[in-house]
Amino acid sequence: MTSMFDSVREDGVAPNSAESIVGKSPRELAWARMSRDKVSLFALGVIITYLLVAALAPVICAVLGISPYALDGNALNDYGLPKGAFGGISTEHWLGVEPGTGRDIFARLIYGARASLLVGILATILTTAIGLVIGVVAGYKRGWVDSIIGRFMDVTLAFPSFLLIIALTRPFTQRLESLGVPEGNPARMTYIILVLATFGWVYVARVVRGQTLSLREREFVEAAKASGATSRHIVFKQLLPNLWAPVIVIVSLSLPGYVATESTLSFLGLGLMQPAASWGVMLGDSVRYYRADPTYLFIPGIALVVLVMAFNIVGDAVRDALDPKADRQNLL
Amino acid sequence: MFLFIVRRIFFAMVLLLAVSFFTYMLFAMLPSDPAALTCGKNCKPDVIAANRIRLGYDKSLLEQYWLFLKGIFAGRDYGTGAAAFSCGAPSLGYSFGQHECVTTLIAQTFPVTAYLSIGAFMLWMLIGISTGAIAALNKGKWQDRAASIFTSIGVSLPTFYIGLLVLFSVVIWLRILPFPSYESPFDDFPVFLRTMILPWLVLAVLSAASYTRLTRNGMLEAMNEDFVRLGVAKGLTRRIILRRYVMRQALVPIVTIAGLDFAGLLGGAIITESVFSLPGMGKMSIRAVVESDLPVLVGTTMVAAVFIVIANVLVDIAYGYLDPRVRVK
């Protein structure tokens, strides 16, 4: 994160008395505003922690000597339920064990973060990339290109996406498997990512197109054109850098949404399958034991809420920080 | 304005035609034989063949699609002689899984979905816009933070999870309400209310979250606009500025999304209906997925698409009313 903003002088360079008024770039202003907001910095820390834990899950499990797949019959009583209070929370099993199998919930939670975040991140990257390209092209070219893309977006938006996602899961997963994607969870994950992007790009493209339409009339684009810049230069060097703000906000909203969709599909039995762990698999599994082991019900849910809350806070903070009018005094 | 509306409606028709074509082709390409599903496991091949001809699955895909389209306007007859039956216009096909015309099935399940959607929609607009406004007017204070936490929980938790959590806690742990069992409001209104209150609340709170966010951000943006500064400079009261300028601008994106969200809900609130065992269109389509009941899937997809397209047209018209700059164009 810091490398993106490494030109920022947070407080280091003492202002030269001769030129005490130093012009700051919009990015510097935004970062300065954001670092004033301790809550959003904390939220950013939470997101980074989640990512690190997910990435290092095998290492963490090896160090702690736990495994997301190992069955532990000793932690269960005769009815197959965790021994001890709160779902069997102990020094050995930090968050208790799964009813029925005795698998360690903490290990499954951090392994589940891998699957859930992987689906969320890949779907977001794909959605954003497609939406950005199509949106910029539509907004910049205008004319018939824009009309065709616009109609195509209308058709995509008119489909009830969730119904189609569910209805097409089985046949399309089979199709992917016959195309050589490894059977089972890899094929199911690929399908979820592809189908989320198929229906998701429109939302990004719509916003990007609108922004591009207004940006292309601005003076700096005019200036670039006048000095003989190619379309390629204008799109990549002039327009794209100005589109990051709305895109970051969409991303901060859509990533948690994708994680939630994955969990819903897993709950319906259409997403990832046991023994693999994802938050969706855990949520779907835990509701079967709601009466006997309520603690289990809350663990994956809380993990999900905390992550999404962090994304929302950071998204809001970025939006507020990038707003050029943010430092105006609010008159109301 | 009139010409604008006529043009929008024409485009909507073309759009629906395109959607119906894609939907029909998509489901027809699925690797399942609709005719084989017409009778049980111990079906004789000649029965399947007869059913295939009776339901028109022996014809080419394009011909099938044409018959489907024709059926919507003219109704459709299946088979000849004593075994013949027909689905009157607007016919969306015949469900071999439930042995009933798809239109009849949708007519039976749609009211449930409509009651659910209307109640939830009114609740969520109320909750969403008011909490969003409170957050915007108290930016950075605890109300704003509280609204942000509410938003995060609402947009993050999957509907099935919140729904089951609410169902368990209210019905099973606290025993405040009996287990939901749907009754039509015209037959037994108290039971209807008792059944609908939880799904209404769950849907409303979950959907309200994004409206809180939209209202907050929209109002904050509007408060920084020059026309608000002008209003302040002119000496207008805070009340008038908020109502006439700030809310009006903030409502524009909300109207768009509200229209589309409501239309999406009318196409079937799949998860909510399943969790609370409401016999609506969403629950029916889940059943159709499980049974590979293609005609029902095509039918519900089409109905859902019609609502989305109608909502799009209405949203465009509402835009012109709310934002004078659109009208000038």
Image (cartoon, rainbow, N blue to C red):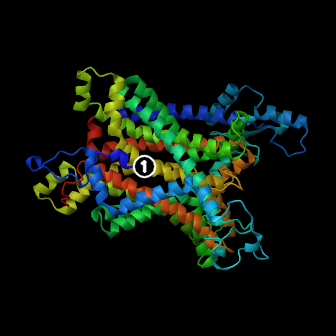
Say which quadrant the N terminus of chain B sits in. Answer: top left
B7 is higher (above) or lower (below) than B199: above
How many marks do you count on the picture? 1
The residue identified by callout 1 is B257
Q: Which of the pair B210/A158 is nearer the observer?
A: B210
Residue extending farthest left = A18
Counting from the top left corner in percent of width and height, residue A238 is at 31, 32
Name which residue lies at 71% across and 34% down.
Answer: A180
Counting from the top left corner in percent of width and height, residue B148 is at 39, 62
Q: Which of the pair A223/A31 is nearer the observer?
A: A31
A219 is higher (above) or lower (below) than B209: above
Counting from the top left corner in percent of width and height, residue A106 is at 61, 65
B147 lies left or right of A273: left
B223 lies left or right of B303: left
Tag 1, which chain? B
Give the secondary structure at mark 1. Answer: helix
Number of residues whose C-alpha sits closer than 10 Å to that of mark 1, classed few (under 14), some (14–19) or many (20 or more): some
A270 lies left or right of A25: right
Q: Quadrant of residue B101?
A: top right
B63 is higher (above) or lower (below) than B296: above
Q: Which of the pair B73/B97 is nearer the observer?
A: B97
Q: Quadrant of residue B125?
A: bottom left
- State whether residue B219 appears in this view: no
Name which residue lies at 73% across and 62% down.
Answer: A70
Counting from the top left corner in percent of width and height, residue B8 is at 42, 34
